[in-house]
Image (cartoon, grey):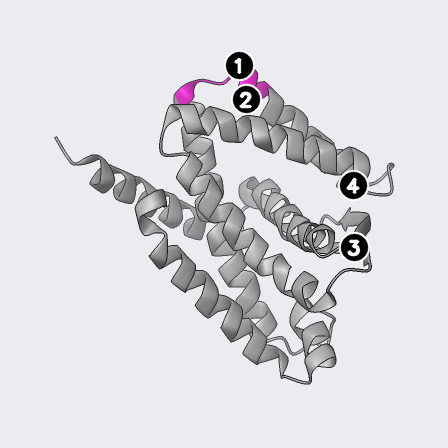
């Protein structure tokens, strides 16, 4: 029988390949929107942790997101989006290792998703609110009715997707040529350090974190 760690590595590899193959398929679109929400929650958490407040979070069907905050340390808030997505990915991968931790994480996600929806996602009559509410209810049903294999499998798949999507989105920030606003562009305006450097830094920190914590999520 294969060692459990080898089985997990094989499972993560399969999940990564499936995600890559179906990257542009509408089937994975909900996961993309969910990771965008994780990204925005990273900004929100940084604002709260540095003494600020969160005014609203918005999501759009084209995988766009925005978090309006007041006060707090803007430098950390801007950095917390992609790093938050990567942190969520690692946490989901780690929680999906055992049925017990998977069930606990599903419960935590239920509280986070429903809480963020009711407190921050605005406007109420919007795509973002509807999506977040449905995601929270779906996670609640999974927590209560889902099998252990469904819970662990979904969390591991979400973790892989969160990490890959964050890396892919960072790549877009590094090579962005449309002149649109992004975390990297706003950091460039704040620090005068070119946006692509911030993108490379996020990528390096993310990969280093994944490697250093590999014993917890492999």
Query: Can you identify the residue that label 4 sits on?
Result: 127
Secondary element type, mark 4 = helix
Q: Picture coordinates of residue 43 (x, y %)?
A: 69, 55
Earlier residue among tags 4 and 3: 3
Mark 3 Cα shell of 10 Å, populated few (<14), some (14-19), many (≥20): some
Instruction: Between label 3 and label 1, give the one nearer the viewer.
Output: 3
Chain part drawn in magenta: 141-148
Closer to viewer: mark 3 or mark 2: 3
Q: Is residue 164 left or right of residue 141?
A: left
> Which quarter of the picture shows residue 72?
bottom right
Give residue 142's mark: 2
Q: Main secondary structure of the magenta part?
A: helix
Element under disc 2:
helix
Residue drawn at point x = 15 percent, y = 35 percent: 2
Residue 143 colored magenta? yes
Rendered position, 49 above or below 108? below
CA–CA distance in space, label 2 to label 4: 22 Å
Instruction: Give the labeled residue for mark 1.
Output: 145
Q: Residue furthest top?
A: 145
- Residue 45 image offset from top left, x and y in percent: 67, 50
In the picture provided, is 163 more to the left or to the right than 10? right
Q: Which residue is mark 3?
A: 52
Q: CA distance from mark 3 to mark 2?
A: 33 Å
User: Distance from label 4 to label 3 (Cα)?
Assistant: 26 Å
């Amino acid at each position: 029988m294969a060692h459990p760690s080898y089985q997990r590595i094989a499972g993560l590899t399969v999940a990564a390949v499936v995600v890559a193959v179906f990257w542009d398929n509408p089937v994975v679109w909900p996961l993309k929107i969910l990771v965008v929400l994780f990204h925005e929650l990273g900004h929100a958490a940084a604002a709260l942790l540095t003494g600020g407040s969160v005014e609203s979070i918005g999501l759009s069907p084209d995988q766009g997101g925005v978090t309006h905050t007041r006060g707090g340390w803007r430098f950390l808030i801007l950095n917390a989006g992609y790093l938050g997505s990567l942190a969520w990915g690692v946490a989901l991968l780690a929680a999906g290792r055992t049925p017990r931790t998977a069930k606990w994480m599903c419960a935590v996600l239920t509280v986070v998703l429903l809480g963020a929806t009711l407190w921050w996602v605005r406007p109420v009559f919007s795509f973002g609110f509807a999506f977040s509410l449905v995601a929270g209810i779906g996670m609640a049903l999974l927590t209560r009715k889902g099998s252990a294999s469904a819970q662990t499998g979904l969390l591991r798949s979400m973790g892989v997707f969160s990490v890959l999507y964050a890396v892919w989105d960072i790549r877009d920030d590094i090579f962005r040529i449309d002149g649109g606003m992004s975390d990297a562009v706003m950091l460039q305006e704040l620090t005068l350090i070119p946006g692509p450097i911030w993108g490379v830094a996020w990528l390096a920190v993310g990969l280093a974190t994944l490697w250093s914590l590999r014993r917890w999520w492999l």
